[in-house]
Image: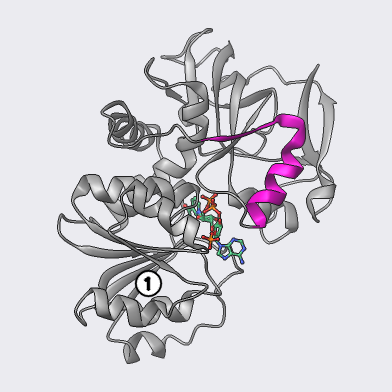
Protein backbone atom coordinates (compact mmCIF):
# COMPACT_ATOMS: atom_id res chain seq x y z
CA UNK A 1 0.00 0.00 0.00
CA UNK A 2 1.03 3.59 -0.56
CA UNK A 3 -0.48 7.06 -0.09
CA UNK A 4 -1.65 9.47 -2.77
CA UNK A 5 -3.80 12.54 -3.32
CA UNK A 6 -6.94 12.03 -5.41
CA UNK A 7 -10.23 13.79 -6.18
CA UNK A 8 -13.64 12.31 -7.00
CA UNK A 9 -15.34 15.43 -8.30
CA UNK A 10 -14.13 18.85 -9.51
CA UNK A 11 -14.18 21.62 -6.93
CA UNK A 12 -12.17 23.67 -4.44
CA UNK A 13 -9.10 22.46 -2.54
CA UNK A 14 -11.40 20.56 -0.15
CA UNK A 15 -12.08 17.88 -2.82
CA UNK A 16 -8.50 16.65 -2.49
CA UNK A 17 -8.31 13.43 -0.42
CA UNK A 18 -5.19 11.79 1.01
CA UNK A 19 -5.86 8.07 0.57
CA UNK A 20 -4.29 4.60 0.59
CA UNK A 21 -3.98 2.86 -2.76
CA UNK A 22 -2.36 -0.24 -4.19
CA UNK A 23 0.34 0.80 -6.70
CA UNK A 24 0.16 -1.11 -9.99
CA UNK A 25 2.98 -3.22 -11.36
CA UNK A 26 4.51 -1.40 -14.35
CA UNK A 27 3.30 -2.48 -17.82
CA UNK A 28 5.85 -3.64 -20.43
CA UNK A 29 7.03 -0.11 -21.32
CA UNK A 30 6.42 1.47 -17.92
CA UNK A 31 8.47 2.20 -14.82
CA UNK A 32 7.42 2.57 -11.19
CA UNK A 33 9.10 5.49 -9.44
CA UNK A 34 9.28 6.07 -5.69
CA UNK A 35 8.90 9.83 -5.50
CA UNK A 36 11.26 11.79 -3.26
CA UNK A 37 9.82 15.17 -4.30
CA UNK A 38 6.78 16.24 -6.32
CA UNK A 39 6.24 19.48 -8.25
CA UNK A 40 3.18 21.69 -7.70
CA UNK A 41 1.96 23.56 -10.78
CA UNK A 42 -0.90 25.88 -11.60
CA UNK A 43 -2.19 23.39 -14.19
CA UNK A 44 -3.22 21.04 -11.37
CA UNK A 45 -5.63 23.71 -10.16
CA UNK A 46 -7.26 23.73 -13.63
CA UNK A 47 -7.73 19.94 -13.38
CA UNK A 48 -9.02 20.11 -9.82
CA UNK A 49 -11.51 22.94 -10.44
CA UNK A 50 -12.91 21.54 -13.70
CA UNK A 51 -11.38 23.92 -16.29
CA UNK A 52 -9.52 20.87 -17.64
CA UNK A 53 -10.96 17.33 -17.44
CA UNK A 54 -9.02 14.27 -16.22
CA UNK A 55 -9.57 11.12 -18.30
CA UNK A 56 -11.58 9.49 -15.47
CA UNK A 57 -12.65 10.03 -11.86
CA UNK A 58 -11.55 9.49 -9.18
CA UNK A 59 -8.30 10.86 -10.52
CA UNK A 60 -4.79 11.39 -9.21
CA UNK A 61 -3.23 14.79 -9.73
CA UNK A 62 0.17 16.19 -10.68
CA UNK A 63 2.54 15.61 -13.61
CA UNK A 64 5.97 16.31 -12.13
CA UNK A 65 8.28 14.55 -9.74
CA UNK A 66 11.69 13.08 -9.02
CA UNK A 67 12.73 9.89 -7.29
CA UNK A 68 14.18 6.42 -7.66
CA UNK A 69 13.15 3.65 -10.05
CA UNK A 70 11.76 0.72 -8.04
CA UNK A 71 10.31 -1.53 -10.78
CA UNK A 72 10.83 -1.71 -14.54
CA UNK A 73 8.59 -3.21 -17.27
CA UNK A 74 10.07 -6.06 -19.32
CA UNK A 75 10.44 -4.06 -22.58
CA UNK A 76 12.10 -1.02 -20.98
CA UNK A 77 15.67 -0.32 -22.08
CA UNK A 78 18.15 2.06 -20.48
CA UNK A 79 16.59 2.31 -17.01
CA UNK A 80 17.30 0.09 -14.01
CA UNK A 81 16.03 -0.30 -10.46
CA UNK A 82 17.86 2.26 -8.32
CA UNK A 83 18.31 4.90 -11.05
CA UNK A 84 17.67 8.51 -10.02
CA UNK A 85 15.05 9.94 -12.41
CA UNK A 86 12.75 12.92 -12.95
CA UNK A 87 9.67 13.67 -15.04
CA UNK A 88 7.49 16.65 -15.90
CA UNK A 89 5.04 15.49 -18.57
CA UNK A 90 2.72 13.26 -16.58
CA UNK A 91 0.54 11.25 -16.77
CA UNK A 92 -1.60 12.68 -13.95
CA UNK A 93 -0.95 11.12 -10.57
CA UNK A 94 2.42 12.37 -9.34
CA UNK A 95 0.93 13.66 -6.05
CA UNK A 96 1.73 10.21 -4.69
CA UNK A 97 4.40 8.23 -2.86
CA UNK A 98 4.83 6.10 -5.99
CA UNK A 99 3.92 6.74 -9.62
CA UNK A 100 3.77 4.37 -12.59
CA UNK A 101 4.53 6.07 -15.91
CA UNK A 102 5.86 5.39 -19.41
CA UNK A 103 9.66 5.01 -19.47
CA UNK A 104 9.67 7.49 -22.38
CA UNK A 105 8.53 10.24 -19.97
CA UNK A 106 11.53 9.81 -17.65
CA UNK A 107 14.98 11.35 -17.77
CA UNK A 108 17.98 10.30 -15.68
CA UNK A 109 18.94 12.89 -13.12
CA UNK A 110 22.56 14.13 -12.96
CA UNK A 111 24.13 13.64 -9.51
CA UNK A 112 24.62 17.40 -9.20
CA UNK A 113 20.84 17.98 -9.17
CA UNK A 114 18.85 17.03 -6.07
CA UNK A 115 15.40 15.42 -6.14
CA UNK A 116 13.90 18.61 -4.72
CA UNK A 117 15.55 20.80 -7.36
CA UNK A 118 14.40 18.43 -10.11
CA UNK A 119 10.80 18.42 -8.85
CA UNK A 120 10.94 22.22 -8.78
CA UNK A 121 12.12 22.61 -12.38
CA UNK A 122 11.13 19.70 -14.61
CA UNK A 123 7.74 20.94 -15.79
CA UNK A 124 8.47 24.64 -15.32
CA UNK A 125 12.03 24.61 -16.66
CA UNK A 126 11.19 22.47 -19.69
CA UNK A 127 8.40 24.95 -20.35
CA UNK A 128 10.88 27.84 -20.27
CA UNK A 129 13.18 25.84 -22.56
CA UNK A 130 10.54 25.57 -25.28
CA UNK A 131 9.17 29.11 -24.74
CA UNK A 132 12.52 30.91 -25.05
CA UNK A 133 14.40 28.46 -27.27
CA UNK A 134 11.76 26.98 -29.59
CA UNK A 135 8.43 28.85 -29.74
CA UNK A 136 10.36 32.08 -30.24
CA UNK A 137 14.15 31.85 -30.33
CA UNK A 138 15.12 34.76 -28.08
CA UNK A 139 18.28 36.55 -29.21
CA UNK A 140 20.84 38.46 -27.19
CA UNK A 141 19.89 42.13 -26.91
CA UNK A 142 16.17 41.58 -27.61
CA UNK A 143 13.60 43.08 -25.25
CA UNK A 144 10.84 40.64 -24.31
CA UNK A 145 7.81 40.89 -22.01
CA UNK A 146 7.09 38.07 -19.55
CA UNK A 147 4.01 38.21 -17.30
CA UNK A 148 3.98 36.74 -13.75
CA UNK A 149 7.77 36.90 -13.69
CA UNK A 150 8.15 36.07 -9.99
CA UNK A 151 6.15 32.81 -10.19
CA UNK A 152 7.42 29.28 -10.74
CA UNK A 153 7.83 29.46 -14.52
CA UNK A 154 8.63 33.19 -14.38
CA UNK A 155 11.53 32.82 -11.93
CA UNK A 156 13.25 30.38 -14.28
CA UNK A 157 12.46 32.56 -17.32
CA UNK A 158 14.11 35.61 -15.71
CA UNK A 159 17.34 33.66 -15.20
CA UNK A 160 17.31 31.97 -18.60
CA UNK A 161 16.64 35.26 -20.42
CA UNK A 162 19.54 36.91 -18.60
CA UNK A 163 21.82 34.01 -19.58
CA UNK A 164 20.80 34.56 -23.22
CA UNK A 165 21.66 38.25 -22.96
CA UNK A 166 18.02 39.27 -23.48
CA UNK A 167 16.33 42.19 -21.72
CA UNK A 168 13.30 40.66 -19.99
CA UNK A 169 10.62 43.07 -18.79
CA UNK A 170 8.82 41.17 -16.04
CA UNK A 171 5.37 41.95 -14.66
CA UNK A 172 4.44 40.96 -11.11
CA UNK A 173 1.64 41.50 -8.61
CA UNK A 174 3.51 43.42 -5.89
CA UNK A 175 6.65 45.46 -5.32
CA UNK A 176 8.22 42.54 -3.41
CA UNK A 177 7.56 40.14 -6.28
CA UNK A 178 8.91 42.67 -8.78
CA UNK A 179 12.09 42.97 -6.71
CA UNK A 180 12.49 39.19 -6.73
CA UNK A 181 12.12 39.05 -10.54
CA UNK A 182 14.76 41.77 -10.87
CA UNK A 183 17.15 39.96 -8.53
CA UNK A 184 16.77 36.84 -10.69
CA UNK A 185 17.68 38.64 -13.90
CA UNK A 186 14.75 40.69 -15.19
CA UNK A 187 16.07 43.83 -16.91
CA UNK A 188 13.07 45.92 -15.76
CA UNK A 189 9.93 45.09 -13.82
CA UNK A 190 6.38 46.46 -13.75
CA UNK A 191 3.89 45.99 -10.90
CA UNK A 192 0.80 45.38 -13.00
CA UNK A 193 -1.51 45.99 -10.06
CA UNK A 194 -0.28 49.61 -9.88
CA UNK A 195 1.19 50.67 -13.22
CA UNK A 196 0.04 51.03 -16.83
CA UNK A 197 1.98 48.17 -18.40
CA UNK A 198 1.52 49.20 -22.04
CA UNK A 199 2.66 52.77 -21.34
CA UNK A 200 5.76 51.54 -19.46
CA UNK A 201 6.63 49.05 -22.20
CA UNK A 202 6.39 51.81 -24.82
CA UNK A 203 8.68 53.97 -22.70
CA UNK A 204 11.19 51.19 -21.98
CA UNK A 205 11.41 50.20 -25.66
CA UNK A 206 11.53 53.75 -27.06
CA UNK A 207 8.15 53.16 -28.72
CA UNK A 208 9.18 49.92 -30.45
CA UNK A 209 7.30 47.46 -28.17
CA UNK A 210 8.40 43.81 -27.87
CA UNK A 211 8.89 41.20 -30.61
CA UNK A 212 7.42 38.57 -28.26
CA UNK A 213 5.12 38.64 -25.22
CA UNK A 214 4.82 35.59 -22.96
CA UNK A 215 1.43 35.58 -21.25
CA UNK A 216 0.34 32.89 -18.78
CA UNK A 217 -2.04 35.14 -16.85
CA UNK A 218 -4.66 34.95 -19.61
CA UNK A 219 -7.93 36.84 -19.26
CA UNK A 220 -6.62 39.78 -17.20
CA UNK A 221 -3.53 40.52 -19.36
CA UNK A 222 -4.68 39.62 -22.89
CA UNK A 223 -5.57 43.21 -23.87
CA UNK A 224 -2.34 44.51 -22.38
CA UNK A 225 -0.34 41.89 -24.25
CA UNK A 226 -1.94 43.01 -27.54
CA UNK A 227 -0.76 46.55 -26.79
CA UNK A 228 2.80 45.55 -25.89
CA UNK A 229 3.73 43.46 -28.92
CA UNK A 230 5.43 45.06 -31.93
CA UNK A 231 3.91 44.84 -35.44
CA UNK A 232 4.29 41.29 -36.82
CA UNK A 233 5.30 40.16 -33.32
CA UNK A 234 4.18 37.05 -31.43
CA UNK A 235 1.97 36.62 -28.38
CA UNK A 236 2.65 33.31 -26.65
CA UNK A 237 -0.48 32.69 -24.59
CA UNK A 238 0.53 29.72 -22.45
CA UNK A 239 -1.73 29.78 -19.40
CA UNK A 240 -4.93 30.87 -17.68
CA UNK A 241 -3.98 31.90 -14.14
CA UNK A 242 -6.68 34.61 -14.13
CA UNK A 243 -9.07 32.67 -16.40
CA UNK A 244 -8.97 31.57 -20.04
CA UNK A 245 -8.80 33.98 -22.99
CA UNK A 246 -12.02 33.45 -24.92
CA UNK A 247 -14.08 35.11 -27.64
CA UNK A 248 -11.15 36.69 -29.48
CA UNK A 249 -12.04 38.47 -32.71
CA UNK A 250 -9.16 37.65 -35.03
CA UNK A 251 -9.53 41.10 -36.57
CA UNK A 252 -7.80 42.54 -33.51
CA UNK A 253 -4.56 40.89 -34.70
CA UNK A 254 -4.84 42.90 -37.92
CA UNK A 255 -5.63 46.15 -36.09
CA UNK A 256 -2.62 45.77 -33.78
CA UNK A 257 -0.19 45.14 -36.63
CA UNK A 258 -0.43 41.69 -38.27
CA UNK A 259 0.27 39.88 -35.00
CA UNK A 260 0.87 36.17 -34.50
CA UNK A 261 -0.57 34.21 -31.55
CA UNK A 262 0.22 30.70 -30.35
CA UNK A 263 -1.30 28.66 -27.50
CA UNK A 264 1.41 26.04 -26.84
CA UNK A 265 1.69 23.13 -24.40
CA UNK A 266 4.74 21.35 -23.05
CA UNK A 267 3.26 18.01 -24.15
CA UNK A 268 3.36 19.01 -27.81
CA UNK A 269 7.01 20.14 -27.61
CA UNK A 270 8.31 17.21 -25.51
CA UNK A 271 6.37 14.74 -27.65
CA UNK A 272 9.04 12.06 -27.99
CA UNK A 273 11.65 10.59 -25.65
CA UNK A 274 14.40 12.09 -27.83
CA UNK A 275 12.97 15.61 -27.75
CA UNK A 276 12.24 15.41 -24.02
CA UNK A 277 15.81 14.29 -23.29
CA UNK A 278 17.41 16.95 -25.42
CA UNK A 279 15.28 19.66 -23.75
CA UNK A 280 16.13 18.24 -20.31
CA UNK A 281 19.85 18.12 -21.19
CA UNK A 282 19.75 21.83 -21.98
CA UNK A 283 17.84 22.61 -18.78
CA UNK A 284 20.16 20.52 -16.60
CA UNK A 285 23.17 22.17 -18.26
CA UNK A 286 21.82 25.59 -17.27
CA UNK A 287 21.48 24.42 -13.65
CA UNK A 288 24.78 22.59 -13.37
CA UNK A 289 26.64 25.58 -14.85
CA UNK A 290 25.01 27.85 -12.24
CA UNK A 291 23.21 30.03 -14.82
CA UNK A 292 19.90 28.96 -13.30
CA UNK A 293 19.74 28.60 -9.52
CA UNK A 294 17.04 26.55 -7.84
CA UNK A 295 17.61 27.04 -4.16
CA UNK A 296 14.51 28.88 -2.97
CA UNK A 297 11.85 26.15 -2.94
CA UNK A 298 8.65 26.20 -0.86
CA UNK A 299 7.94 22.72 0.59
CA UNK A 300 4.84 21.02 1.99
CA UNK A 301 4.21 17.44 3.13
CA UNK A 302 2.32 15.47 0.43
CA UNK A 303 -0.78 15.31 2.59
CA UNK A 304 -0.94 19.14 2.59
CA UNK A 305 -1.40 19.37 -1.18
CA UNK A 306 -4.67 21.30 -0.72
CA UNK A 307 -2.86 23.95 1.31
CA UNK A 308 -0.08 24.20 -1.28
CA UNK A 309 -2.68 24.74 -4.03
CA UNK A 310 -4.56 27.30 -1.92
CA UNK A 311 -1.40 29.36 -1.51
CA UNK A 312 -0.52 29.14 -5.21
CA UNK A 313 -4.04 30.12 -6.32
CA UNK A 314 -4.11 33.06 -3.88
CA UNK A 315 -0.89 34.50 -5.42
CA UNK A 316 0.92 34.07 -2.09
CA UNK A 317 3.86 32.13 -3.55
CA UNK A 318 6.98 33.04 -5.49
CA UNK A 319 9.21 30.57 -7.32
CA UNK A 320 8.52 26.83 -7.17
CA UNK A 321 6.48 24.82 -4.68
CA UNK A 322 7.01 21.11 -4.08
CA UNK A 323 5.40 18.34 -2.02
CA UNK A 324 7.53 15.90 -0.06
CA UNK A 325 6.09 12.38 0.52
N1 LIG B 1 1.36 25.80 -21.59
C1 LIG B 1 2.33 25.23 -20.91
O1 LIG B 1 3.09 24.42 -21.44
C2 LIG B 1 2.52 25.60 -19.47
C3 LIG B 1 3.46 24.90 -18.70
C4 LIG B 1 3.67 25.32 -17.38
C5 LIG B 1 2.94 26.36 -16.86
N2 LIG B 1 2.00 26.99 -17.62
C6 LIG B 1 1.24 28.12 -17.10
O2 LIG B 1 2.17 29.07 -16.63
C7 LIG B 1 1.60 29.75 -15.53
C8 LIG B 1 2.56 29.73 -14.36
O3 LIG B 1 2.55 28.45 -13.77
P1 LIG B 1 3.22 28.22 -12.36
O4 LIG B 1 2.83 26.84 -11.94
O5 LIG B 1 4.65 28.58 -12.43
O6 LIG B 1 2.43 29.25 -11.44
P2 LIG B 1 2.96 30.61 -10.79
O7 LIG B 1 3.49 31.50 -11.85
O8 LIG B 1 3.87 30.29 -9.66
O9 LIG B 1 1.64 31.20 -10.20
C9 LIG B 1 0.75 31.91 -11.00
C10 LIG B 1 1.02 33.40 -10.90
O10 LIG B 1 0.14 34.07 -11.80
C11 LIG B 1 -0.09 35.37 -11.34
N3 LIG B 1 -1.51 35.72 -11.43
C12 LIG B 1 -2.00 36.79 -12.10
N4 LIG B 1 -3.33 36.84 -11.97
C13 LIG B 1 -3.70 35.81 -11.20
C14 LIG B 1 -4.95 35.36 -10.70
N5 LIG B 1 -6.12 35.99 -10.98
N6 LIG B 1 -4.98 34.26 -9.93
C15 LIG B 1 -3.85 33.61 -9.64
N7 LIG B 1 -2.62 33.99 -10.09
C16 LIG B 1 -2.54 35.08 -10.87
C17 LIG B 1 0.38 35.42 -9.88
O11 LIG B 1 1.57 36.21 -9.84
P3 LIG B 1 1.44 37.79 -9.52
O12 LIG B 1 0.82 37.90 -8.17
O13 LIG B 1 2.83 38.26 -9.61
O14 LIG B 1 0.52 38.33 -10.58
C18 LIG B 1 0.66 33.98 -9.54
O15 LIG B 1 1.69 33.86 -8.60
C19 LIG B 1 0.23 29.14 -15.27
O16 LIG B 1 -0.76 29.89 -15.96
C20 LIG B 1 0.37 27.79 -15.91
O17 LIG B 1 -0.84 27.22 -16.27
C21 LIG B 1 1.78 26.61 -18.92
Could one spot residue 268 in this view of the protein?
Answer: no
**Measured along the vertical axis of the image, is residue 278 above or below residue 3?**
below
Q: Residue at x 15, y 54 (%)?
A: 140
The N terminus lies in quadrant: top right
Relative image position of residue 127 (x, y in whole percent): 42, 47
Q: Nearer the viewer, residue 52 or 155?
A: 155
Q: Quadrant of ligand 1?
A: bottom right
The C terminus lies in quadrant: top right
Q: Is residue 285 magenta?
A: no
Relative image position of residue 165 (x, y in whole percent): 18, 51
Colour scheme of the rendered structure: one colour
Q: Which stretch is magenta?
A: 297-314
Q: Main secondary structure of the magenta part?
A: helix
Secondary structure under tag 1 reads: strand
What residue is pinned by disc 1?
261
> In screen coordinates, is 43 left or right of 214?
right
Q: Residue at x 52, y 65 (%)?
A: 217
Amino acid sequence: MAKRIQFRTPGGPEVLEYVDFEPAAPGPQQVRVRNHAIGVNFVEIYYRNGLYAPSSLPSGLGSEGAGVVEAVGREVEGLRVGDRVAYGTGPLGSYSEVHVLPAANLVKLPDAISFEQAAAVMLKGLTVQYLLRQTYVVQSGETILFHAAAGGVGSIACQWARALGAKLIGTAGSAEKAARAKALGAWQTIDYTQEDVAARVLELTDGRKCPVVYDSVGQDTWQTSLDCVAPRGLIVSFGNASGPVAGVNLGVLAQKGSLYVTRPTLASYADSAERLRSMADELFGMIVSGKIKVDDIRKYPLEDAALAQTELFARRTVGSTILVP
